[in-house]
Amino acid sequence: MDKNQATGLILIALMLITYFTFFKPEVPPQEEPIAQTEEVEKSLDMPDSAAISPAPTLPDSLLDEENRTKYGVFAPGANGESTLAVLENELVKLSIDTKGAKITEVLLKNFKSKDDQPVRLITEKTNEFSTLITSMSKSIDLNELYYSSSSSNSSDGQTITFSLNLGNGKSVSHQYFLAHDTYEVDYNLKLTGLDGDVTKDEILFNWNEQMITQEKDVEMSRINSTVNYYTLSDGFDELSERSTEYEEEIVNESIKWSTIKQRFFLSAILAEKSFSKGKFSTDVDLNNPEMVKNAKVSLSIPKEDITTSEGGNFTYYFGPNDYHITTEFSEGFSKNLWLGYPPMLWVNKYVIIPLFDLLNNVLDNYGLIIILIVLVIKLVLSPLSYKSYLSMAKMKVLKPELDEIKEKHGDDMSKAQQEQMKLYQQVGVNPISGCVPMLLQMPILLAMFYFFPQSIELRGEGFLWADDLSNYDSIMSLPFEIPFYGDHVSLFVLLMTASTILITYSQQQVSSVQGPMKSLSYMMPVIFMFVLNSYPAALSFYYFVSNIVTFGQQVLIRKFVDEDKIRTILDENKKNAGNRKKSKFQQRLEDAMKAQAKKKGKK
């Protein structure tokens, strides 16, 4: 070999090394080319001697050099084999990949999705984890490295440990522990001997999830899905549930936990200490009914939390949004189940949920449970209902005199109101006494509006023609969509509307209300028909049963209310009006009326 040949070979070698170091293409897995080669050989009936050789691979020394350049001290984890390890108990099954030591699938055994398959909260295609550290100006994703796995079982539960030995006493480990009969997964992340190699004080944990549609009504799911979080200083907070636009929140304070919340299910992570800060976002692809929302969670973990000998301890929660379970997970975690503002929150928390649980321990038919809830509540509130009806009966008896006052004073409303107040005082009637009992009952009616759409106990439970009380019932699908109504007809909502109109008519028989207010009282049931058509069947069924019981109460009360006797009592009160002291309310109201009349007179 002469000098020119030697020089040429050296230059070619340098060019190859430069190419494969800086411009190296992706090297495909060896199994696929071999399989393809075998298929080509068979199709062409080539003899063994003519078999096509697999594509050449880079020398190990070059691969090692490239990995060291890209991964630094973490280069031993750049290559490996991807296999799945299973963590499982009576309630949940998790699949965890040795590539990245990350969860690739979460299956809830006791719940079915809309396609009658077990609920999958996480799949490899819809979920992405990354744990990013900075080492010597390189960003390393611990969830892209390869680990060896080992599993152990004990009386407490199952443990799977994923380890990566980096040499020189340095290692990375991910450990998962799942106890029996729980939805909580303990997770420990530990970097040993790497304190000097991790050059940033924070590790960035990213969790991106496309929420899989589990329910038949994706629209109801979307307005009940979001990202929630809990800070040590301000407590519970959330991104807007009902929003279909891009939502984002940056939190520069300590965070205890964060939840990717769907209507009935939660995926959450809790820090034993805290995350130093976080960023949360949601957005919606309205053209994809198979996905509810896209959620992104980014949390910063202090480096010292995972480089100690104990490592960083965290807990995942993959399970139902059940009030009884979430109250035990962490402080404020039960707020993932939105039960309304006070006083509706108090009614749900201290009345409805305990009553529901009591009946659920005895009965397994949720339709009957709803009926019994109505009967119990109506029985407790019957004194208020009686007082309200009696007040309306008094106002009906006074209606001729009230009409006479209006006719007498014509357009002088101030004078007419003063005369009416004088009449109320003389006969001993408080004009708003009938409204107070109704107002006291309103928190219960509104509490149901929050309770039934969130109650996971009703999910998948049928009653009469409704196959799922947590979803709307439909007796007819329309070939078109009616604005603000939908493309289906809910029979429970129609029954609720008809019964509400019946109640309104019954009340009008003893009411003194006239004019536009009377017409409005008939319009409200129609408005609610549009609003509730796509709400859970349990809610409209509850309102329907409540209306029927209320109507029965009114019929019964009417038998005990004698309007002639009321007239006699009012006349007697009018005779003795001079000996009766005004109530504080009447005095304040009369003073206000006089002040208004005086002010009007000056003008």
Image (cartoon, rainbow, N blue to C red):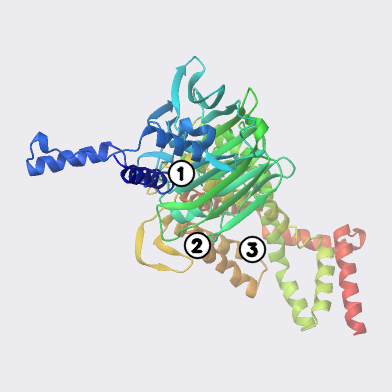
Going from N to C along the chain, the mark reached first, 1 or 2, is 1
Residue contact at pointers 1 and 2, CB within 8 angstroms: no
- The residue located at (84%, 78%) in the rendering is 415
Q: CA distance from mark 1 to mark 2?
A: 39 Å
The percent coordinates of residue 590 (x first, y second) are 87, 67
Going from N to C along the chain, the mark reached first, 1 or 3, is 1
For residue 134, which quarter of the picture? top right
Q: Residues within 10 Å of mark 3 (few under 14, many from 20)?
A: many
- Mark in front: 1 vs 3: 1
Kindly identify which residue carries mark 2: 529
For residue 416, which quarter of the picture? bottom right
Q: Is residue 325 above or below residue 204?
A: above
Kindly identify which residue carries mark 3: 510
In the shown orientation, is residue 33 left or right of residue 263? left
Quadrant where the N terminus sits is top left
The percent coordinates of residue 35 (x first, y second) are 21, 38
Asked if one can make out residue 273 in the rendered structure from this viewpoint, the answer is no
SS state under label 1 = strand
Q: Is residue 307 above or below residue 232?
A: above
Kindly identify which residue carries mark 1: 127
SS state under label 2 = helix
Q: Residues within 10 Å of mark 2 (few under 14, many from 20)?
A: many
Frontmost residue, 145 versus 466? 145
- The residue located at (14%, 38%) in the rendering is 51
Q: Is residue 409 above or below residue 432?
A: below
Frontmost residue, 138 versus 318? 138
- Mark in front: 1 vs 2: 1
User: What residue type is disc 1 on?
Assistant: Asn
- The residue located at (6%, 40%) in the rendering is 45
- The residue located at (35%, 64%) in the rendering is 478
